[in-house]
Amino acid sequence: MSNLALRMQSYANVKSLNSLDGSKETAVKGVYFYRSPKGNKRQPFLYQSGIIAMGQGHKKIHLGEQSVVYGPGDYLVVGVPLPIECEAFTQNDEPILGLSINVDGQVLHNLVSQLSDTAFAQTQSHQNPELTFPYLKDKGQLDLGIQSECLNDELDNAFTRLLNVLHCDRDAKVLGDAIVNEIIYRTLLGRHGHILFNLAQHDGHYARIAKVLNHLHQAYAQEIRVEDLAQQVNMSLSGFHRAFRDVTAETPLQYLKKVRLTKAKDLINLDGKRASEAASLVGYASPTQFSREFKRYFNNTPRSFT
């Protein structure tokens, strides 16, 4: 068992979380501890933007025709909310353990601003002339909004220190935010740091798509026209479609449908809504169409989640 896994298991022991099946927010706002005793077969999930470190177990994420695998000692960078399909696997009958961090927008902007005032951008551009430094200019092909990478020594150390302070609520309150900021900073310096860098650039294509995704998560129940979405972010329709698919591996309407169905499942499962009511609340005019698409997406009827 790695040191990171040991600290996660120790945290679960101290906080009486050894029966947890899911995620629970820690004493540091925006930091969540995840535990799953059995894993799961391939099924739809909605991943929020952030940074996820795995201590134990493996996951395979499917996004369109692409897949991302991460396991012990890896971390995942998620730039935008993404409806994905995920398989989770335990090893040696030990639970899956992970820690996720929601990236605060103001913290991200402050860090990017500070980095842009250093020689870091020029150094990166000089060392990698074929890859323009990500926050200065969009590349011709946008990166998928979710990538995995091995934890380097600095990030492994920072996550370990974060887990250490999470053991004590007083330590977490005083020291937690500073360590979270360090983790975001060191992620920005990593190979997939551009996924977060580009979020802070209001005029870049990646940030424009992120703005649209945030809008879809707020206005999913309304009538949505792709032409209006493109116009909101001052992009041509063809350019918008291309950039949207580069980031999410979905068309705008496919993405919207998955968001609506995921929100409806939560309304049924968590709020006790009837299927027809949930369908209406997420923007479906036809209950029949909703039930058909729900079953196709989740491989189960809405009734199975009541």
Image: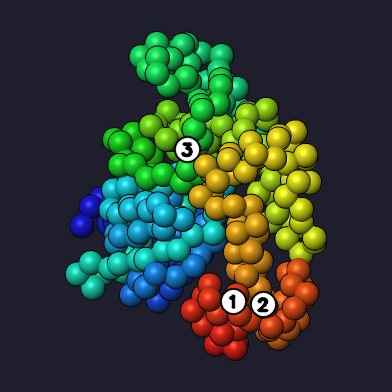
| Residue drawn 68% across the image and 30% down it | 202
- Is 68 positioned to the left or the right of 215 in the image? left
Question: Circle 2 sits in a helix, a strand or a loop, which is it?
Answer: helix
Give the quarter of the figure containing the N terminus.
bottom left
| Residue drawn 55% across the image and 46% down it | 245
Sequence-first disc among 1 and 3 = 3
Rendering coords of residue 207 (x, y %): 63, 36
Rendering coords of residue 133 (x, y %): 48, 21
Sequence-first disc among 2 and 3 = 3
Q: Which residue is mark 1?
A: 294
Per the rendering, the mark at residue 290 is 2
Label 2 packing within 10 angstroms: few (<14), some (14-19), many (20+): many
Viewer-nearest residue: 129 or 152:
129
Label 3 packing within 10 angstroms: few (<14), some (14-19), many (20+): many
Per the rendering, the mark at residue 152 is none
**Circles 1 and 2: CB distance less than 8 Å?**
yes
Rendering coords of residue 80 (x, y %): 57, 47
Q: Which residue is mark 3?
A: 143
